[in-house]
Image (spheres, rainbow, N blue to C red):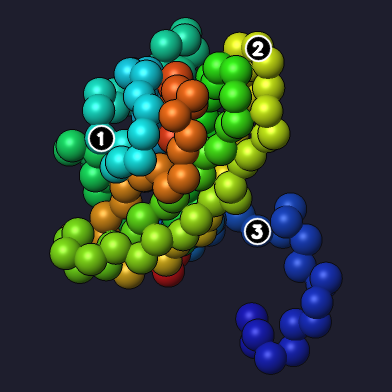
Amino acid sequence: IVTGKITDGTIATADIADSAVTAVKTSGVGISVVDQWYMNTPFSGNADITANWTSTMPYTGYGVIGSAVTESSGIFTFPSTGIWKVSHDTYIQFDAGDFVIQIIYNFSTDSGSSYDAQDAPLIGLGSVDTLTRMQHSFSAIYDVTNSSTARFKMSTGSISAQTTVKEIFLTFTRLGDT
């Protein structure tokens, strides 16, 4: 076949032999890693979120695709290079009074010597009279060009005294090649 003379739409999928489509020709196509982490140790105050992360989800039917992200003391390491989406769902409880919370994503390219902070939107409510619960979600995209030195951690910025973070679900999804 002379490829210079093939016009768009002239080769149908049915014209391609099954044996011609190999893993080598489809590498980098689709999501290759999805991994979820869970933290259910309630905490208050401004700090890095380090306590009791687990990769075991508290529900049945949980699954992982590809190599797992690793965690040590709240610092996550990526298993491979690529474009990664990191997202969280945080469940928050606050008592009567003013309510403010900010979750911060921290990304490092130098093995954690320094971090660039990306602030999720600050959530705040005026004065509330009763116990209230809320969910906070955010996501960011990172280009992991060196999986040996890329690190991720979460922290809190502004958090009011009446606020308790109850649990966090953190999801890492590798979207494609860098």
Q: Is residue 107 visible?
A: yes
Label 3: few (<14), some (14–19) or many (≥20) C-alpha neighbours in 10 Å: few
Query: Which quadrant, please, contains the N terminus?
Result: bottom right
Q: What element does badge 1 sit on? A: loop
Q: What residue is shown at x 60% (from left), y 18% (from top)? A: 96
Depicted 175 relative to depicted 158: above or below: below
Q: Disc 3 marks which residue?
A: 16
Q: What residue is shown at x 56% (from left), y 38% (from top)? A: 100
Q: What residue is shown at x 25% (from left), y 49% (from top)? A: 77
Q: Nearer the viewer, residue 51 or 13?
A: 51
Q: Disc 1 marks which residue?
A: 50
> Taking 114 as reference, is 178 left or right?
right
Specify which label sits upstream in the sequence, 1 or 2.
1
Q: As shown in the figure, which amino acid type bears the numbered disc 2?
A: Thr
Q: What residue is shown at x 46% (from left), y 45% (from top)? A: 158
Depicted 63 relative to depicted 158: above or below: above
Cβ atoms at labels 3 and 1 below 8 Å apart: no
Residue 80 placement: quadrant: bottom left
Image location (x, y in percent) of residue 115: 29, 63
Q: What element does badge 3 sit on? A: loop
Specify which label sits upstream in the sequence, 3 or 2.
3
Q: As shown in the figure, which amino acid type bears the numbered disc 1?
A: Thr
Observer-side mark, 1 or 2, equals 2
Label 2: few (<14), some (14–19) or many (≥20) C-alpha neighbours in 10 Å: few
> Taking 69 as reference, is 177 left or right?
right
Q: What element does badge 2 sit on? A: loop
Residue 63 placement: quadrant: top left
Image location (x, y in percent) of residue 26: 50, 58
> Taking 99 as reference, is 163 left or right?
left
Q: As shown in the figure, which amino acid type bears the numbered disc 3?
A: Ile
Query: Which quadrant, please, contains the C terminus?
Result: bottom left
Image location (x, y in percent) of residue 113: 16, 64
